[in-house]
């Protein structure tokens, strides 16, 4: 009977180190490597055949890159151009065409579509948001995403639908990443939305969110202080329009506790429309 103890297991780290020092640096090779053989001497330069200059194959003609008109960063000159184009638009369709051709706002470079408007331009209620989101940019219409669907529910609660309102945004091009538009971007787009309001001539304006309210009511107060109170929008033609700032549907989806505030605002809007009809 064999009572001898089993052979000790070698240290794997030590074994691998031994193999590396011995030159065993590959697990498998087709040809054995003699690490004790001296390297072959270099070939003398006179035996090296010089390389001949071989002609390169002709390159295929590269397609010409499409030229795009550069989009300008908003400045005083572009604001003046926007004012001129907006003033020369006699109809909403002409205004849309002028905005399509306008390249004075940097947001146009990253947006897919111009988001002009939706709804009935003969309606007594005009709703103005801040800027398009991803869904609006894809479809070219305002308020078609999740926040827009919630807005449809709010309108239905006061007996209205999209055929009875007109919708637009202060900014017609989507800011990258749905960021808030800068004051420069807002200023460059202001002439277009002001002319749009003048052409629609609504009885009541609703400003959704702080950007819309601050831009068109010329105020610096936050939307939570502005909402729930009637203000006056001074139109370009000298006609004053009652305006109600309220919370944006996208904000209400993030802060559902404030839905009750927006509900009060829309009840006020319903009563104002009834009084003016």
Image (cartoon, rainbow, N blue to C red):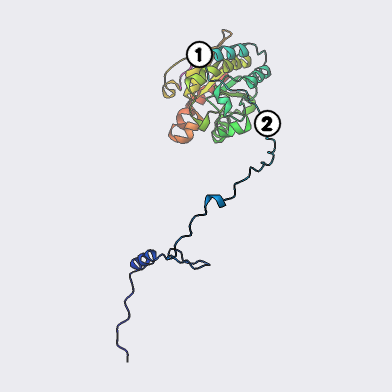
Q: In the depicted view, which residue is nearer to us: 152 or 64? A: 64
Q: Mark 2 or 1, which is nearer the eye?
A: 2
Q: Is residue 253 magenta?
A: no
Whether residue 270 is visible: no
At 59% from the left and 21% from the top, the residue drawn is 125
Main secondary-structure element of the magenta-colored stretch: loop
In which quadrant will I find the C terminus? top right
Q: Earlier in the sequence, mark 2 or mark 1?
A: 2
At 54% from the left and 17% from the top, the residue drawn is 188
User: Residue 140, percent across and down?
Assistant: 63, 29
Q: Quadrant of residue 193?
A: top right
User: Residue 256, percent across and down?
Assistant: 45, 35
User: Residue 14, percent across and down?
Assistant: 33, 67
In the image, residue 22 above or below residue 182: below
In which quadrant will I find the N terminus? bottom left
Q: Quadrant of residue 35?
A: bottom left
Q: Which residue is mark 1?
A: 232
In the image, residue 12 above or below residue 82: below
Q: Which residue is mark 2?
A: 64
Q: Which residues are magenta?
A: 228-232
Q: Residue furthest top?
A: 238
């Amino acid at each position: 009977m064999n009572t001898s103890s089993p052979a000790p297991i070698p240290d794997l780290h030590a074994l691998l180190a031994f193999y590396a020092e011995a030159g065993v640096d590959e697990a498998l090779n087709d040809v054995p490597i003699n690490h004790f053989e001296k390297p072959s001497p270099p070939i003398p330069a006179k035996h090296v055949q010089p390389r001949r200059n071989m002609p390169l194959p002709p390159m295929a003609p590269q397609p010409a890159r499409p030229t795009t008109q550069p989009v300008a960063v908003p400045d005083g000159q572009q604001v003046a151009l926007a004012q001129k184009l907006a003033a020369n638009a006699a109809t909403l369709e002409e205004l849309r065409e002028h905005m399509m051709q306008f390249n004075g706002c940097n947001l146009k470079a990253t947006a897919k579509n111009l988001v002009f408007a939706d709804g009935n331009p003969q309606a007594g209620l005009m709703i103005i948001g801040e800027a398009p989101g991803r869904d609006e940019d894809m479809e070219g219409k305002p308020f078609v995403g999740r926040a827009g669907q919630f807005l449809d529910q709010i309108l239905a609660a006061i007996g209205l639908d999209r055929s009875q309102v007109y919708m637009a945004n202060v900014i017609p091009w989507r800011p990258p990443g749905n960021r808030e538009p800068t004051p420069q971007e807002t200023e460059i787009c202001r002439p277009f939305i002001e002319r749009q309001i003048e052409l629609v001539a609504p009885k009541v304006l609703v400003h959704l969110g702080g950007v819309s309210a601050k831009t068109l009511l010329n105020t610096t107060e936050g939307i939570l202080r502005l909402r729930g109170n009637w203000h006056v929008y001074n139109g370009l033609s000298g006609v004053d329009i009652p305006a109600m700032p309220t919370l944006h549907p996208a904000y209400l989806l993030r802060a559902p506790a404030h839905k009750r505030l927006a509900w009060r605002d829309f009840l006020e809007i319903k009563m104002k429309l009834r009084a003016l009809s």
